[in-house]
Amino acid sequence: MAEQKVKKGFLGRFLDVLSGKPSEEGPESNPEKPVIDFASVESDPTDLEFVKKFTSSGGKFLYCEDEAEAYHYLSQIMDESGLNMVYCTNDNLNSILRKAQVNLSEHNWQESDAFCTSCEYLVSFNGGIMISENQLHGKKLDDLPETFIAIGRTSQIVENLRAALAGIRFRYKNNLPSQITTIKGPKKVEGLEEENSQGKICNKEIYLLLLEDQL
């Protein structure tokens, strides 16, 4: 039986374009041309708005349909950026890094040149990645390596900072984490005012690997 090709949804096709993947929509597709005209979209869905804002701020975005793609991209990031060691304290992410054959340290952040982290939420309003004490473990952002590799899930995308903070309050109830901070790319997005939050904006050279949730 011939293998049946599954047609991707709107999010998958759009994120493929931003990740530089060729379109699979047919022979008339041109990979050098965007398949979506932003000017014709009156109101982008929350997930697409996040990607636009994140990349506008200089963040480097990579969409992964599964963890196998994450292994490939992590290896590419290490090679192309000249990174030698990644500091990471998250057991689940460490498993991904090991499978990608990344040189990993769970303790020595001073001699690492990249920091791999999970996130609390991905905020569409400003293209920011919300992290907290659960990711930083008492470390200051300024003390961590200048290159961040964040790994998040599509289900973590929310509309704004209020929704993210409400989610944190609900998830942790009476044990709210400290050091709630939003990080994004190194460029300031013109005309974008930050909403009030319990953290500060801290710019880093940042990669985001966005994994599709496995349903």
Image (spheres, grey):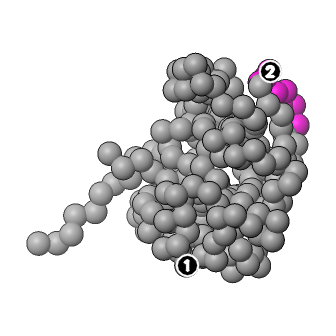
Q: Is residue 159 visible?
A: no
* Distance of label 1 from label 2 (alpha carbons): 40 Å
Residue at x 81%, y 61% (from the top left corner): 145
19 vs 154: above or below: below
The answer to which image quadrant residue 7 occupies is bottom left
Q: Quadrant of the N terminus?
A: bottom left
111 vs 13: above or below: below
176 vs 86: above or below: above
Residue at x 48%, y 39% (from the top left corner): 155
- Magenta-colored span: 190-197
Give the mark nearer the N terminus: 1 vs 2.
1
Q: Quadrant of the C terminus?
A: top left
Q: Nearer the viewer, residue 43 or 136?
A: 136
Residue at x 69%, y 64% (from the top left corner): 107
The residue carrying mark 1 is: 101
Say which amino acid is labelled 2.
Answer: Asn
Residue at x 83%, y 34% (from the top left corner): 200
Q: Residue 163 placed where, x, y %? A: 61, 22
The residue carrying mark 2 is: 196
